[in-house]
Amino acid sequence: MFVLFALPISGESKQVIISAIGIVVGATVALSSTTFVSNGMSGIMLRLAHPFSVGDYIRSGDVFGRVSRTNLLYTEIQSIDRDIVTIPNLKLMSTPLTTILSSGTIISTNVSLGYDIPHESIEQALLDAAKKAGLEDPFVHVLELGDFSVTYKVGGLLKNIASLLTDKSNFNRLILDSLHESQIEIVSPTFMNQRVLSEERLFVPPVMKEIEIHTPEEDYMIKKSPEDVIFDLATEAEVIDKAQKLVLDFGDQIKDLEEKLSGLPEDILLEKKQEIEILKKKEKDIEKMLDAIKETSHPEKLTKSEGIIRLKALEHLRSIVESVNSEFTILCDDVGKLCLLEESDESDSDNEADSKRLE
């Protein structure tokens, strides 16, 4: 603009040039901000729809993992390789999004077996594996009658999804064990062997004895599951998010509960108030732990000893949050039942009074 005003041209020419520059700049800003605005609007829609929370397992396209962070413009997912994948919110809203419910999910696997084996034997072996894996309502489906083999699908409901990857692996391992114990061969439909073997030879591996090796250091180490290592950032974010939500809503929930207690007898009121005071103390402990965790450095910058201390603090925070939630739910149920009994007693006394007046 300085150069433009310094040019030896007329004022009208300068105005034309300024208008042209304004149009170009405006068009550039408008076009470049389209993605920015679209991601922002998609972030608002995600906040309103709330299809997932921090710590949930989700799948979007080829990306699968746990949500570690949500933002107005993007969402971070920690993949099964422990990498952080940043997905624009516009992509999450424009492609199908799969969220695994925290209440449980169906895990299943397919296995192809020969026509020479009775399907009743196969189904029983597969159901035994599903029961050993702790799956509820297990099932076996016949998916396909192929040219060389029959494809079976076995699965069931997994209630606790905290160790989803490990549970899937253990489920496949138990299927192998169950089929081998039933003397059922698992070979490729195009299996071919050039060696001369007896017809009674089965391709089932021998049962190996598990050897447990214990070292004294294990008593002082924190046992981590593969999911704890893979989804460490997502797990931490989930614990902190649940704790923050509990602290944010705790005051209003306690007030509502104390209003319900006002109509109960004095002895019951005193007992329930003591339980509420215990919950308040735990809530204060949660606030202190949240402040302490926020003051520490990022997990990636901590030393090994500091990381162990932080991990223990997070585990302790998780246990306190779960304890407060469960105790508060039980307390609310008890208060609700007591209020119903009190109302029924009052209605019974009113009915007796009405009957006496009628007599």
Image (spheres, rainbow, N blue to C red):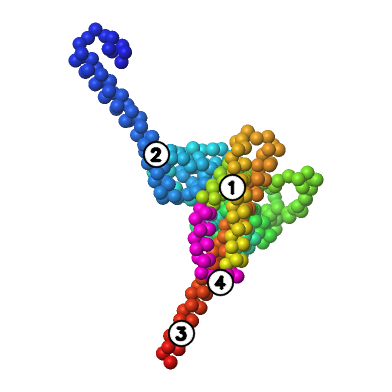
Q: Closer to the camera: disc 3 or disc 2? A: 3
Which residue is tagged 3?
353
The amino acid type, in three-letter code, at marker 2 is: Gly
Residue depicted at 21% across the width and 18% down the height: 16
Q: Distance between the residues labelled 3 and 2?
A: 64 Å
Q: Closer to the camera: disc 4 or disc 2? A: 4
Magenta run includes residue 263: yes
Return the x and y of residue 198 as percentages of the image width and height.
71, 55
As drawn, the label of residue 40 is: 2
Q: How far apart are marks 3 and 4 (CA)?
A: 21 Å
Q: Which of marks 4 and 1 is nearer the N terminus?
A: 4
Residue depicted at 35% across the width and 30% down the height: 32
Residue at disc 3, secondary structure: helix
| Res. 221 in view | yes
| Foreground residue among 338 and 29 | 338
Label 1 crowd (10 A; few <14 / some 14-19 / many >=20): some
Q: Which of marks 4 and 2 is nearer the N terminus?
A: 2
| In contact (CB < 8 Å): disc 4 and disc 1 | no
Which residue is tagged 1?
287
Which residue is tagged 4?
265
User: Is residue 173 rendered to the left or right of residue 6?
Assistant: right
Toward which corner of the image does residue 82 lie, by quadrant?
top right
Residue at disc 1, secondary structure: helix
Q: Which of marks 3 and 2 is nearer the N terminus?
A: 2
Q: Distance between the residues labelled 2 and 1?
A: 31 Å
Q: How far apart are marks 4 and 2 (CA)?
A: 53 Å
Label 2 crowd (10 A; few <14 / some 14-19 / many >=20): some
Q: Which of marks 1 and 3 is nearer the N terminus?
A: 1
Residue depicted at 67% across the width and 56% down the height: 177
The amino acid type, in three-letter code, at marker 1 is: Glu
